[in-house]
Amino acid sequence: MIDFELTDEQRLIRETARDFADGEIVPRARENDRNEHFDTELVQKIADMGFLGAIVPEEYGGRGVDYRTYALIVEEIGRGCSAMRTVVSVVTSLVCSSIVRWGSEEQKQEWLPQLCSGEALGCFGLTEPDTGSDAANLKTRAKQVDGKWRIRGGKMWISLGNFSKLALVFAQTDPEKKHKGLACFLVPTDQPGFTTQEIHHKLGLKGSDTAELSLDDVEGDMMGEVGDGFKIAMSALDSGRYSVAAGCVGICQGSLEASVAYSKDRTQFDRPIGSFQLVQEMIADMVVQTEAARGLVWRAGWLKDQGKPSTTETSIAKLYATEAAVKCADLGIQVHGGSGYVDDYPVERYLRDARVTTLYEGTSQIQKLIIGRAYTGLNALVP
Ligand code: CAA
């Protein structure tokens, strides 16, 4: 059964990640958010700590830690800044874990050490302007020309797209085969035909890079085989959703800590506001949601570490933790009153950054359909 007691090593890694988040990430979060600055220097520091390839085996440049430990790291980075947590989630979970599971030995040797060390960033090119939740229905096409795969199409909302050296691109090879015609390609971005455009004016994650990708006959190195594309995407999301959920536990925890501190400091009616029952109710709601979210993430991580199926439990954790992050950040603002509405305190950024997490890597509605199908055996998406 799952053991909630952390090992000495896990405790040490968590403390190291917490100190790093407080020392390096938190002090830069507000300015990077204000300036919409994607802080590549900070990304390199995160990589230098070994936090970009934590679950990648050591022989490929990673730290080879288990999923539970990975969640501890991601929670601390998420508490510091969700823009930086997004870098960890995309590079580690969506890109590296896909290459670890589906890549050839040559592909692993070529890309994993670069991704873990921060020498290269990677992005995950699944979503398109007209294809979000219906991920199998891709318009991007791949065809073989003189023995090489050529890809044409466009991708949308791609985190790290403007800064990545490698793009994992999902494309259709034969539309009649539907999801069984999809393939996944490793696409180096420094080639003619690969162009990107920055997406601005987001509600949150302003310190994160988001791009639209254009692929005009670019060359791709297929990972797996034709027909593996959809499974690669879904297995990547099994890890990515877990990572998003862990980061959201960090937002919950950060909202709670900021609110407890503020409620003890701020006085009204000659008493600290934390002594009022209605403020304590808000604190208690945050505590319960934070603990519940963390427990669900740890359960999903434990299943992954045991090599057991975890898709449903990952969706449960992702659904609960992302919604909890929105609620805890919102409660955090309520505790802070007017002060919570400006960026002197982290809670307004927490709310803006949390909001995307119920959208990306599968909306809350998609998570509910995955959970509903697992429990009823009925697929709501098939007539
Ligand atoms: N792992 C491996 N294989 C899986 C799998 C998993 N978790 N889930 C499904 N598959 C396989 C199935 O076994 C099946 O294989 P066969 O064809 O051999 O039988 C195949 O995939 C099709 O499975 P389903 O019938 O379950 O697929 P579906 O079409 O019903 O899936 C869906 C529907 C669950 C809604 C899926 O389309 C989905 O998750 N959509 C949401 C997409 C999403 O999350 N997008 C986020 C984009 S990434 C992003 O946001 C990145 C960023 O930059 C931040």
Image: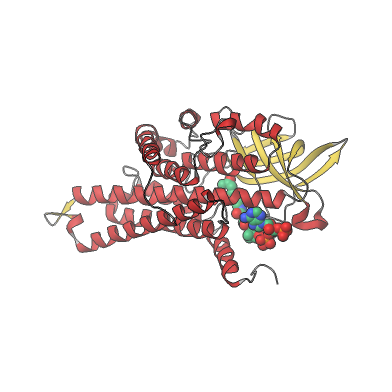
Residue 305 place in picture, x, y as percent: 52, 48
Is 350 above or below relative to 40? Answer: below
In this view, which residue lies farthest toward the front? 1
Residue 134 place in picture, x, y as percent: 67, 58
The residue that appears at 48% across and 52% down in the rendered structure is: 302
In this view, which residue lies farthest toward the right? 146
> Is 349 in front, or is 5?
5
Task: Determine whether, in the image, residue 297 is placed left or right of residue 181.
Answer: left
The residue that appears at 55% across and 56% down in the rendered structure is: 310
The residue that appears at 69% across and 29% down in the rendered structure is: 190
Task: Determine whether, in the image, residue 249 is placed left or right of residue 180.
Answer: left
**Is the N terminus in the top left, top right, bottom left or bottom right quadrant?**
bottom left
Q: Image quarter for residue 121?
A: top right
Task: Determine whether, in the image, residue 152 is placed left or right of residue 156.
Answer: right
Residue 297 place in picture, x, y as percent: 46, 53
**Is the C terminus in the top left, top right, bottom left or bottom right quadrant?**
bottom right
> Is 76 in front, or is 308?
308
Is 380 above or below relative to 279? Answer: below
